[in-house]
Amino acid sequence: MNRPISIGVSACLLGHRVRHDGDHRLQPTIKDDLEELFQLQPICPEVESGMGVPRTPIQLVETRYGVRALEIQDPGKDYTQKLGQVAKDWVCANPAICGLILKSKSPSCGLGSTKIFNQAGEISAATGYGVFAQTVRDLLPGIPYIDEIQFSDQQARIQFIHAVQHYHSASNSMDI
């Protein structure tokens, strides 16, 4: 018997009030288009790493140690390791995950769309991946992923759904 197809989704996109300001970013299209096709697994790496709701926001900052996820009001608070560990733990706890829909521009979940700042607080010309997103991509290099902005494009949405189904089929055939 085939296992259900599970995809990880940023919890804020499913209407969970987990954002730094206590709000959400519900994307009805994600829920409406996918909850009958897939088992949706909400994840908020920032909450899972121990940050509360509400909380002081974090941002990606280029430092001499590389890009770090630092608290905006207190740059001495570095959440990079915690977010990376949340990703590792999440991947281990969810071995059946076949796709990801993550929050764009997020310092934890962004998929190449997250602003990077210098240590003076100025926006760099570069954008990057959130810490959770990058760690999951490193651990699961072939997994399909998309953010909510890309998902709003019908063609990209269809391609993502097909990629998830293909990934699921390929992983099921390896289980035999």
Image: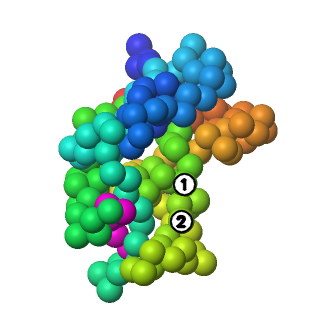
Kind of residue at disc 1: Lys
Q: Residue at x 32, y 86 (%)?
A: 64
**Up-down: is 157 above or below 64?**
above
- Asked whether the residues under the numbered discs 1 and 2 touch, taking CB atoms below 8 Å apart as contact, a structural biologist would say yes
Circle 1 crowding by C-alpha within 10 Å: few under 14, some 14–19, many from 20: many
Left-right relation of 118 to 76: right
- What percent of the width, then of the height, locates residue 8? 44, 34
Q: Quadrant of the C terminus?
A: top left
Q: Residue at x 43, y 57 (%)?
A: 107
Label 1's element?
Answer: loop
**Quarter location, residue 123:** bottom right
Q: Which residue is mark 2?
A: 115
Q: Which residue is mark 1?
A: 105
Q: Which residues are magenta?
A: 67-72
Q: Residue at x 45, y 75 (%)?
A: 121
- Is residue 169 visible to us here? no
Kind of residue at disc 2: Lys
